[in-house]
Amino acid sequence: MFYQIIKEIYRALLVAIIIFIIMEIIEPGLVISFISLNLLLIFWFISGIILLLVTYK
Amino acid sequence: MNFLKSLRIVLYSLLIITILFLLNQVVVPFGKISYKYNFCKKDNLITKLLPQDRVKPIKNCKQKIIGDPVYFNLKTFRKFKKIKLGIKYFSKNTPLIQIGSLIDGNLWQYDLRPVKCQLIDNLVRSNNWNLIKDGRTILLQREKKYKTINNFLNHLPNKNKIALLNYNLKKDFILPYYKSSRVKKVLNCKLQGRHQIFTYVANENLNWTFEFKKIDYNKKGNLIINLYYKDELIKSDKINNYANKFILFVKKPKSGFYKIDIKCNDNVIIKKITTQQHLFNFIGGIRFWKNNKLPINIYTNSQVVYGQTTNPNSLQRIKIESIGKKNDIIDFNINKTYKLFSQPTTATTTKLLIKKDDIIIKGDGIFAFSIKQLSNPLFQKISRFTKINNLDYILANYKIPEKLGNEEYAKVEFDLSKAYRENGKYGFMISIPGLRVNDKIDDWIKIDEINVELDK
């Protein structure tokens, strides 16, 4: 169950990051003026590591 | 499985809401959008107040301004037509506060609106003068003579008894004793940068010849000469070839005052001006370039004169002589480069004796090379030096700030279709005339909040 939850979060964050990066390329400053992409990347990275650890176990 | 489905719905709903919020910033489907900057944390849309040496560090989510002017930018993701800018502030010993919107990015020209005018605030709050209100327009009369603002505008009293604030009062100024002349006047003074000239024309051609040169031909910048009649642009010419003389000619235009605006940066020198008009004066100041015939005598009706130079060899004491008052001479000392010095004048007309050129002389009135040319079509504008004793009427487009406890809140509106926008940013300025860093006067303004309402 925990694995599934992390997987969902990881996927949602990945989709969000891709969309936000595309939006940022189209309209520079639009996303970073309101959302910290760095923080989003860190959360995505952490969720990815947790996902790897859970899969490994 | 149900839980996972719900989690997925929540996560993707959050993402969709965020995307819709971001798209709203670009599309603005409802036509309006607003932002608020309260100095508590960094804002990516409203930049911090700059330059740093004119503001104190942010304390308790408020920022003190100690020098004039300060600037900030507003980032938007599309163009807007209108902006309502509100500021919540607390001020000490600041008679006039204005906010400006950048309208010319090359010449750093701002369209100013008053936020606070202590002179008007005191008159309104004390009920000493009669007040007539019509929307944002207010008319203050020492004694009640006019019942409506329209009545006042249709039967204007003596021009010298009226002061304006943020009001464009258009009136025909006809000089009945003016006689045109066929003799051409030559102004051999070399002037630097942008200058605005008022000239009077009656039953004659408007005929001006300008000779220009560039200091550095590699530097970019436009040279545009605009001709205005009653604030309406009637002729505009862009000059590309600096080697040729430029002739500004209009055949027998309507009688009245015309404004010639020589729009250029400081890289352009006006070498010589030849004109058929024998009544002309410079609006707001003159910047003298090097190698002029010295000394230079100029006359002004400014209530305060400013002086500045970037050349150490041009540091000097300018003699300001009051016309009509014997032995009333002030020594205006300009003893530091780059610093803007100011000196209030003591008479309605003063003569300035300038011993060294490469200097900027500015003021809130007009400047002329002969006292006979000091014919001013402009109404007096309210400044921090305005003396109430000489006035009977104040006409203003101004709203008295709201009192919010110790603080005050004022809102000003700008037309953004005329504003300068670069890299998605609009430029603004907070101007507090007379506010200087390190002048040992306890004057400042503390900004609590900046509110922005944008209209598509």
Image: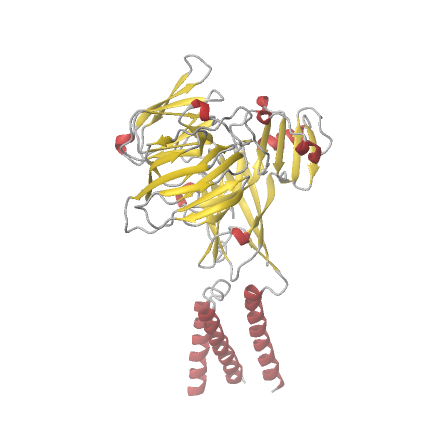
- In the displayed structure, B231 sits above or below B22; it is above
Q: In this view, which residue lies farthest toward the top?
A: B326
Query: Image quarter for residue B386?
Result: top right
- In the displayed structure, B407 sits above or below B47; it is above
Return the x and y of residue B167 as percentages of the image width and height. 59, 38
The figure's colour scheme reads secondary structure
Return the x and y of residue B294 as percentages of the image width and height. 29, 26
Return the x and y of residue B324 as percentages of the image width and height. 47, 15
Of B414 and B214, the residue lying toward us: B214
Query: Do we see residue A21 in this rendering?
Result: yes
Of the 4 image quadrants, the one containing the C terminus of chain B is bottom right
Of the 4 image quadrants, the one containing the N terminus of chain B is bottom right
- In the displayed structure, B368 sits above or below A27; it is above
Return the x and y of residue B146 as percentages of the image width and height. 71, 29
Q: In this view, which residue lies farthest toward the right?
A: B147
Query: Image quarter for residue B244?
Result: top left
Query: What residue do we see at 44% from left, 18% from top?
Result: B322
Query: What residue do we see at 47% from left, 28% from top?
Result: B302
Of B172 and B70, the residue lying toward us: B172
State the count of labels.
0
User: Is residue B50 rendered to the left or right of residue B314?
Assistant: right
Query: Do we see residue B59 in this rendering?
Result: no
User: Is residue B171 rendered to the left or right of residue B130?
Assistant: left
